[in-house]
Image (cartoon, grey):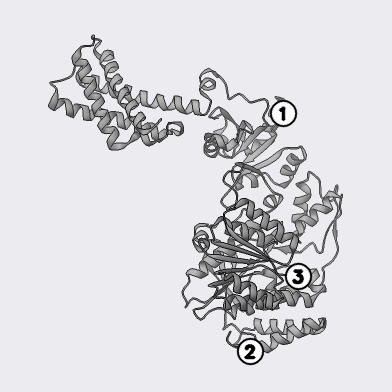
Amino acid sequence: MGHVGKIGTHVLLAFVALLVGRYLVIDMPFTPDTLLQAGLYALASLIVELMFRVERAPWRFVSASDHLRLFRSAFLTAATFMVITRFSHPGIDGGLRTVAGAALIQGTFLSALRVIRRSLHERQLLDSVLRLGPASMHPALPRLLIVGSAVEADAFLRAPAGLGERYTPIGVVSPMDRETGDELRGVCVLGAIADFDRVLARLRDSGLSPSAILFLTDSAMSTFGAERLGRLKTEGVRLLRRHGVVEMGAAASGPALREISLEELLSRPPVRLDPEPVRALVSGRRVLVTGAGGSIGSELCRQIAASGCAQLTMVDTSEYNLFHIDREIADSHPGLLRREVLCDVRDTARVTRVFAEMKPDIVFHAAALKHVTLVENHPCEGVRTNVLGTRNVAMAAKACGAAHLALISTDKAVAPTSVMGAAKRVAEAVARQYGGGGDMRVSIVRFGNVLGSAGSVVPIFQQQIARGGPVTLTDAAVERYFMTIPEAVQLVLRAVALSMIATDADEAGVLTLEMGEPVKIIDLAKRMIELQGLVPGRDIEIKITGLRPGEKLTETLLDVNEVARPKAPGIMEALRLSAAPVIADERLETLDALASEGDEAAVRAQLFDLVEDLRQVGPSKVVKIRAS
């Protein structure tokens, strides 16, 4: 129904309301004068409608605030009618009582009309009128148990699309015991989370075992614990949650609910960062991502594409990975101008040509060799990719006029003991040397282990658990900082956004996530075993194998010559205590020559000599790199 039709309906209801109000108040037969008064009352209603446009609120989405506005409109109509009759009519039978009755009846009519319309829209009219008990269940749909407060559950149940007509809610489990017994849109609050096992047993005794459990918040999920969640998964219960802000690239037309990933069950509650600065940064700009097919690079591509970039160039040396991320972006963003480029960042000439052709405004350098043990065994390859590849990308980005370069680094670059960590520490310095001076800005972003990434401990533990164990780890005291892939990518994007709005006078530090306390790997292994409904040590053995070359017991986010300061909510910045040293071209050329010759011992020595210079606290004596 259009706005004109709604206004006409409201005016007609006002006309009828005065007639009914007059009849109820003074019980007299209708006269021509009565119809005149009803007509004036309808005119007053029309005036109020045109002034306040009550009809704009869609009837099928009516809420409590809409009902209050309807009654306000009714009483304003009565007041307007009183003003009109004072000047154009000698009076009204029944006086103020008739007008007050008409206002109440009009408001009731308007409210009832919308209640009926919304009930029809949600196909709940007959069920709501005839049902005497809680909501009936659709026998063909899986049963859904909702975990969350009454307010959160009510907001979820109010949206018909929230369930997607794929589940039948059978109850709510609330964090607050006082909400037990409440009924939310026909769905009962069965008990508190503390009594979850008892609630579940009662449902099973009644033949109503849930097929899925929906967690409305991270806090609700975290109160369950790995052992209980693992038991539920073993029993075949699906664990669900709604799509959140972190999943910026998710299609709006996709399902409202999704299964909770193992990484979410293992990690701490994720840090939430405001996505708007990132959208403002990327929107309308040409963006290039190296390592685009990897875990971090592919998520960067998803979120950048979802933020409305003008052009996305995806660079990777892996044909397989590049093919898959290109197909995914093509399917999810068919109108986006994109280009996939097979390119090894170690190939200087090829990198230069790609950047000159694509002319990116912003470059995200995620290409790197990151597996500590493999890089330790192949130091020349690690240096050629992580150090010299970074130099190639930074030089090409500056030469093509890019406004910003963001380097993805790691917490293993702090006080590095491995070739991988040392190479990334040198890469930080190399990238920084090409920024500043009012030209290209450079952001360095460090973060810890990423749950679910290629080479992560999680898939390794999964495979070991699946084949019955043992789960192997190098030392019971090993601990690491962990974050999820979307969380890591949010940090990278936000870091660039922060650097882009900084002034030239601002000192560029290394940005990192405030990641809470590190997690012991042995505790992670135990939780993963429990999440499969098994008992660590009894069903699955945990075996200690000893530290590998280059591996540390703990990682830190700050080095000896750095101090932390808050940069933004959830982000801190590591600033040097002294002027940042720079690396002479000659030393990089020597490192390149040694790596090309395959002299592993000399590469290690040269690499760690550079790291020692970079970690010094006093003034640098390293010769500056020539201008580029």
Residues marked 1 and 3 touching at CB (< 8 Å): no
| Disc 1 to disc 2, C-alpha distance | 72 Å
Mark before the other along the chain sequence, 1 or 2: 1
Q: Position of residue 483 (x, y in %)?
A: 66, 59
Q: Which residue is mark 3?
A: 552
Q: Between residue 129 and residue 358, name the one nearer to us.
A: 358
Q: Position of 237 compared to 626: left or right?
A: right
Q: Is residue 160 above or below residue 544?
A: above
Q: Nearer the viewer, mark 1 or mark 2?
A: 2
Q: Residue shown at 80%/55% (left/top)? A: 461
Q: Position of residue 264 (x, y in %)?
A: 67, 51
Amino acid beneath label 2: Val
Q: Which residue bears the numbered disc 2?
A: 622
| Residue marked by disc 1 | 204
Mark-to-mark CA distance, 1 and 3: 48 Å
Residue 415 in sight from this viewpoint? no
Which amino acid type is marked by label 3? Lys
Task: Please name the residue shown 67% across and 30% down the image.
Answer: 141
Is 234 on the left-hand or right-hand side of 192?
right
Please name whichever residue, 30 or 551, is drawn nearer the observer in this view of the structure.
30
Q: How many angstroms separate mark 2 from mark 3 (CA)?
A: 28 Å
Which residue is drawn at the image coordinates 80% and 85% (left, top)? 602
Nearest to N terminus: mark 1 or mark 3: 1
Q: How dense is the environment of label 3, judged by Cα within 10 Å: few (below 14), some, or many (20 and up)?
A: some
Dot 1 amino acid type: Arg
Query: Position of 378 compared to 585: left or right?
Result: right
Disc 3 secondary structure class: loop
